[in-house]
Image (cartoon, rainbow, N blue to C red):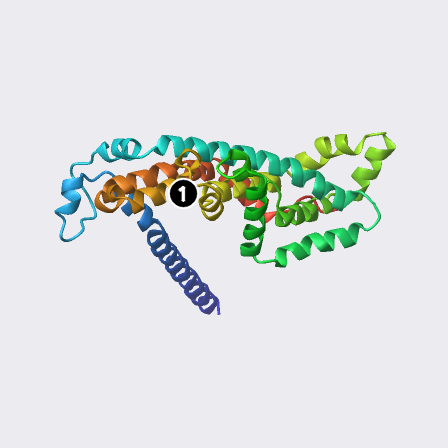
Amino acid sequence: MNETYAAIEKRAARSARIRKFLTYLLLVFWALLVLFPFYWMILTSVKSYGAYNTEYIPKFYTLSPTLQNYIEAFTAVSLGRYFWNTLLFTVVTTALMMAVIIPAAFAFSRLEFKGKNIVFALFLSLMMIPSELVIITNFVTITNWGLRNSYLGLILPSVTSVFYIYLLKENFEQIPDELYKAAKVDGTSDLKYLLRVVLPISRPTIVTVVILKVIECWNSYVWPRLITDDPFYFLVSNGIQEIRENGFGRENIPAMMAAVVVISVPLIVLFLIFRKKIMEGVSRGGTKG
């Protein structure tokens, strides 16, 4: 009987090892599949123009890497200017959005006022409107205000988000009511309660929202392309499109890839720095009462 139990345990352990091996094998395969485009982008960016054009069969390595493509990417077009515009647009838009959505989410989650549920339902209904219709409305409004080809015209339509207000509202509502009641008994104002209690508890979710908004702003293409036709206000997405459309981008693929690497690095670094906060914000929405 003992031998039978031992044999069963041995087979179970062997099956567990096989499943674990297959799982890791699948994960490694999937990781290689996902990361290969990034590897190819970086590899191409360090190949010389001549070496790239003489490769009839693409090589997965290079013996003579060069940084000349990065120099050409910054000198052929105003990539530095596009980079600065995108950084300014991202930082200002994200900061203004957080200043708008945090008080809005707190008001909907904690404050009591007439018609709150109706107003919030109307807010949620805006998510049903196609983004193309919103872009058309924003374009007409910004044009009528004379804000085309300006930083203000780029930033204004992106300073709020119904989805992020909803996300933070649900997060704030998970904070126990007893904390709010105790704070009010102590004479704490709503603003002080928001700053000293709600924000520290909800930090993972807030960091996640900030990161998502930064990525959204950094990758923004349609609205900047629509509202600006002056290269002085181009973002990196517009800059990459300009590089691709002119002769430089179509001929010098390695330099084009170098420009893409330069634009992608900030987002990759941002994720590597805040990856734990992002995962924590996604996995938990706050403190359950």
User: How many residues crowd mark 1 within 10 Å: few (<14), some (14–19), many (20+)?
Assistant: many
The reply to whether residue 163 is in sight is yes
Say whether residue 257 is left or right of residue 59: right
Q: Residue at x 68, y 46 (%)?
A: 171
As rendered, which of 279 and 158 lies closer to the eye?
158
Above-or-below relation of 191 to 105: above
Residue 126 appears in which quarter of the rendering? Answer: bottom right
Q: Residue at x 82, y 51 (%)?
A: 115
Say whether residue 250 is left or right of residue 163: left
Q: Residue at x 83, y 45 (%)?
A: 113
How many labels sit on residues?
1
Say whether residue 59 is left or right of residue 195: left
Q: Residue at x 35, y 36 (%)?
A: 262
- Assign a secondary structure to mark 1: helix
Q: Which residue is mark 1?
A: 237
As rendered, which of 223 and 200 lies closer to the eye?
223
- Give coordinates of residue 267: x percent, y percent: 44, 39
Amino acid residing under circle 1: Ser
- Give coordinates of residue 204: x percent, y percent: 60, 40
- Give coordinates of residue 114: x percent, y percent: 84, 48
Say whether residue 113 is left or right of residue 11: right
Q: In the displayed orientation, state which residue is furthest to the right.
A: 185
